[in-house]
Image: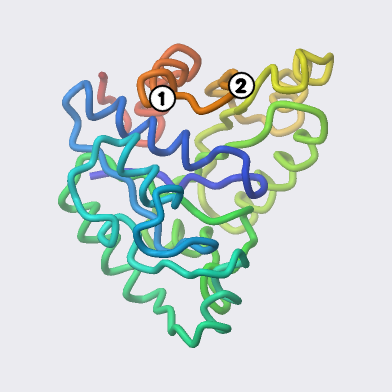
Amino acid sequence: MSGAVVIGTDTEVGKTWITGALVGLYREVGLRATAWKPVQSGCRPGDPGSDSARLKWLGGLEEEESSICPYTLAEPLAPALAARRAGVALDPQKWREILNVRLQRYDLVFVEGAGGITVPLADGFTAVDLAKGADLPVLVVARAGLGTVNHILLTVAYARQAGPRVVGVILNGEGRDGGTVAEQTNPELIREYSDVPILGRVPWLPGRPGREEILGAVKEHVDLEAILQSIRGGDRC
């Protein structure tokens, strides 16, 4: 049993797409992989655009969305605040229990956070707390263009100070800004100042890409073997 908590440097950096694609690709090579997200906001149950729907679709998962994500909150706010305003009690201890069961049941569990690393999932509880409680490392997903270096360095520093090991960084949406100098030089700068590996540079996919296009891009541009080796140690796909 093993896994990682996927944390974005901000909202809308593509961590749901990356998380779902990783699950789908590892399942293709025979691993019992799954995705789990403790809480999502800005959508309603059954919304085809929700993170749980996208994780199910990309991961090729058969389980119900309510199992992939147990709490869905309507307002597009930090989950802790959205829950407070909706009168919903979120229970991090229950999340820990659910996650432990999934870690026992599956070979590989990718846990998706919400927004950036310090966003409260519940009152006084962040994705880092979830990672620490389950003894899971952190995988960072970030934008590829200008401004991402600062976001990544802050995210990595915060994670390290809090305790979880950082597996590496996946840069998402490369080329969206037109192949700027920043996009070309950011990877080396990130390696130099954070001492964490760049595990992928996924290109920008315009329009509404299909599942195979998304999985194909991640398969081609992400070092799946390095991720697996880092979070599990020794297994090969």
Q: Which residue is mark 2?
A: 204
Name the residue furthest bottom: 87
Instruction: Determine whether the residue tagged by mark 1 lies in a helix, strand or loop.
Output: loop
The x, y position of residue 184, in whole percent, is: 76, 13
Q: Which residue is mark 1?
A: 210
In the rendered view, does 3 fall on the left or right side of 200? left
What is the three-letter code of the residue carrying label 2?
Answer: Trp
The answer to which of 89 and 65 lies nearer the viewer is: 65
In the rendered view, does 123 fall on the left or right side of 9? left
In the rendered view, does 104 fall on the left or right side of 120? left
Residue sitting at x 61%, y 51%: 159
Q: Are marks 1 and 2 in contact (CB under 8 Å)?
A: no
Instruction: Tell me: residue 174, above or below residue 110.
Output: above
* Mark 1 vs mark 2, CA separation in Å: 13 Å
The quadrant where residue 72 appears: bottom left
The x, y position of residue 130, in whole percent, is: 44, 62
Residue sitting at x 19%, y 50%: 63
Dot 2 alpha-carbon crowd within 10 angstroms: few under 14, some 14 to 19, many 20 or more? some
The answer to which of 109 and 214 lies nearer the viewer is: 214
The x, y position of residue 229, in whole percent, is: 36, 26
Dot 1 alpha-carbon crowd within 10 angstroms: few under 14, some 14 to 19, many 20 or more? few
Residue sitting at x 70%, y 39%: 152
Instruction: Tell me: residue 200, above or below residue 73.
Output: above
Locate the N terminus by quadrant: top left
Residue sitting at x 62%, y 39%: 13
The answer to which of 66 and 34 lies nearer the viewer is: 66
What is the three-letter code of the residue carrying label 1?
Answer: Gly
The x, y position of residue 206, in whole percent, is: 59, 22
The quadrant where residue 8 appears: top right
